[in-house]
Image (cartoon, rainbow, N blue to C red):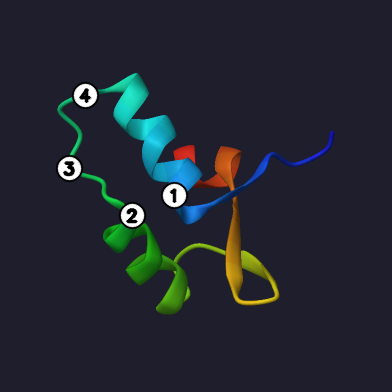
Amino acid sequence: MVPRMRTLEQCATYFKEQDPDTTLTRYRIRQLVLDGTIPHAMCGNKYFVNLDRLIE
């Protein structure tokens, strides 16, 4: 299965669409990436997160 890699902004938008009252923001996702809680890949200066792993 091919992972659904998304930018931080796309992840935040996905969660906002699924739950308009969510408190998970782009900034919080970025913090989780930087402290190593969420695995990520970089392409240039952009972080890409596996959306399915983030949902888990």
Give the residue drawn at x 47%, y 54%: 8
- Mark 1 Cα-neighbour bin, 10 Å: few <14, some 14–19, many ≥20: some
- Mark 2 Cα-neighbour bin, 10 Å: few <14, some 14–19, many ≥20: some
Q: Circle 2 sits on which residue? A: 26
Q: Is residue 24 above or below residue 39?
A: above
- Residue 20's tag is 4
Give the residue drawn at x 48%, y 75%: 36
Please provide percent x and percent y for residue 7.
55, 53
| Secondary structure state at the residue bearing disc 2 | helix
Can residue 17 be seen? Answer: yes
Q: Nearer the viewer, residue 11 or 3?
A: 11
Please provide percent x and percent y for residue 32.
38, 66
Q: Is residue 36 above or below residue 49?
A: below
- Residue 51's tag is none
| Secondary structure state at the residue bearing disc 3 | loop
Q: Circle 1 sits on which residue? A: 9
Q: Answer yes or no: do the residues labelled 3 and 1 have beta carbons within 8 Å?
A: no
Give the residue drawn at x 57%, y 42%: 51
Q: Earlier in the sequence, mark 1 or mark 4?
A: 1
Q: CA distance from mark 2 to mark 1?
A: 6 Å
Please provide percent x and percent y for residue 5.
67, 47
Picture quarter with the N terminus = top right
Q: Answer yes or no: do the residues labelled 2 and 1 have beta carbons within 8 Å?
A: yes
Q: Nearer the viewer, residue 13 or 28?
A: 13
Is residue 22 rendered to the left or right of residue 50? Answer: left
Kind of residue sitting beneath label 2: Arg
Q: Earlier in the sequence, mark 2 or mark 1?
A: 1
- Mark 3 Cα-neighbour bin, 10 Å: few <14, some 14–19, many ≥20: few
- Residue 23's tag is 3
Kind of residue sitting beneath label 1: Glu
Which quarter of the figure has residue 14? top left
